[in-house]
Amino acid sequence: MRTIHLVWVGALGACLVAGACYGWLQSRERQRASLVRAAVPPIPNLAAWPREYASRVRAATAAANRLEQPTAALSELAGLYHANDRYREAQQAEGGLHALEPKNPQWTYLLADACGKLGDVEGQRALLERTLQLAPYYAPTRIKLAELLLKLGLPDEARAQYEWRLTLAPKDPYGRLGLARIALQRGDRITALRYLEAITSDYPDFPSAHNLLAEIYANMGEMARADAQRRLSGGTGEWREADDPWLSRIYAWSFDPYRLENLGGNRLQSRQLEASLPFYEKAVRLAPGDGSAYDALGNLYLQLSRLDDAAASLRAGLAAAPRTAELYSTLAQVLRKQGQVGGAIAVLQRGIGELPAQPELRCDLGAVLEENGRREEAAAAYREAVRLNPALAAAHWNLGLCLLGLGQENEAQVSFGRALELQPRNADALITLVQKALDARQFNQAGCWLHALVDSGPGIPVRQLVERALAAARQAGDEKWARDFEQLLTRAPR
């Protein structure tokens, strides 16, 4: 009897425990369901958005409200909203995801980005600091927080974050640039120069370091070094943000062709060609009438040596947007690589017929003609480009080279001088050409370029180069050019 009683007591206890567990699970599910439903934003007006975008927003919203794989559905909503500038809606969805997964640092990071876009600086700072607690290894957070602290006038706190960044990535240019700026704020120019010169040594295509160095050298009165840094900055391309895989992943949900092209461009800059391809393909799919999107895709195929795909993309672009000048230029480039010189010339002539006021197309036509020995026709094309846009440095430069090939040194000198005035960084290329010409004892070419440098590039240090040219002409017994270089030496800057 006692045994039976014990069995009944045990069974009752098990039932009570099971019931308590079931009740707890039910309560937890109800709480989870409440969190999910509160995190689902009302669907905004989507009339102006692409059909595919609107369809996906509605489907993800419905799935989340049905509690059908709610985390996945909310994640999709967060991506769709965040990547397409609907930051209020994104914030609501990401807040719910953070409540569901409080230890996932990506939600606090995305919430910080949304706060920043919405102007909530304090919220952004708190969320970035929380992200660092959850994921101290994620280096982009350090840069984001450091930049924010610097804007808030907290350089000491910003410096700590930049130094942490360098602990994670010792040669990181963004961390060293931040420390250089803080050093300048303190008046410590020596430390700033050390950081900036290290950046330009390790990352010669990092424009911000060149710009800041130019500013410092100018303040020190070292104008030649400042000019050199400005020239280097002009040849490195545009500023680009530090790599940020979490944000890149979320912005892959974008339905904005311009943003997609930028995302693809960021990968191109770091030579991730295959990784950038889906962004460009999606941009074309979303904007089938945008000639620039087709051109970007065609250029990428060209870099991947997929010439047939490039030509197909560019021809499709011309069919959709025949007044897009760059499509003609890029297609001509592809055809030249395929050995179809006649086709390249025909495409450029077609483009000129469609867009007669576009000087760049004349430049491209001149290059193809000159490459195939048709220098007189090329010079005419370049002259027309210069007439259409007298400020187009490339046209003056190409015309100068073409005229020099035709033996018209005086006219070529005028063209080079104008190119140099419009684009001072051409001085480096001219100096290199002079050195090569002197090595080959081609004094007519060297003289043409030296005159352009002296006459149109005031302050450019070419005196030693003129002295070298004079010595070479004397050694070769060329009295005519020796006299010319001797006279030029009297005008060369010291």
Image (cartoon, rainbow, N blue to C red):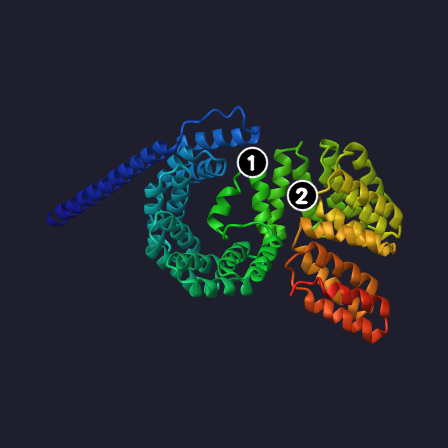
Upstream in sequence: badge 2 or badge 1: 1
Q: Residue furthest bottom?
A: 475
Question: Is any part of residue 104 visible from this angle?
Answer: no
In this rendering, position of residue 411 left or right of residue 101: right
Q: Quadrant of the C terminus?
A: bottom right
Q: Position of residue 158 (x, y in %)?
A: 36, 55
Circle 1 residue: 256
Task: Depth check: give the residue in front, 64 or 265.
Answer: 265
Numbered disc 1: secondary structure: loop
Separation of residues labelled 2 and 1 (CA atoms)? 15 Å
Q: Position of residue 459 (x, y in %)?
A: 63, 59
Question: Against 105, is 359 above or below?
Answer: above
Amino acid at pointer 2 = Leu
Q: Position of residue 424 (x, y in %)?
A: 65, 53
Task: Depth check: give the residue in front, 400 or 456.
Answer: 456
Instruction: Identify the residue at image location x=44%, y=65%.
Output: 190
Circle 2 residue: 297
Q: Position of residue 246 (x, y in %)?
A: 46, 48
In this rendering, position of residue 288 left or right of residue 225: right
- Which numbered circle lies on residue 89? none
Amino acid at pointer 1 = Asp
Question: Against 75, is 452 above or below?
Answer: below
Task: Depth check: give the residue in front, 282 or 126.
Answer: 126
Q: Quadrant of residue 358?
A: top right
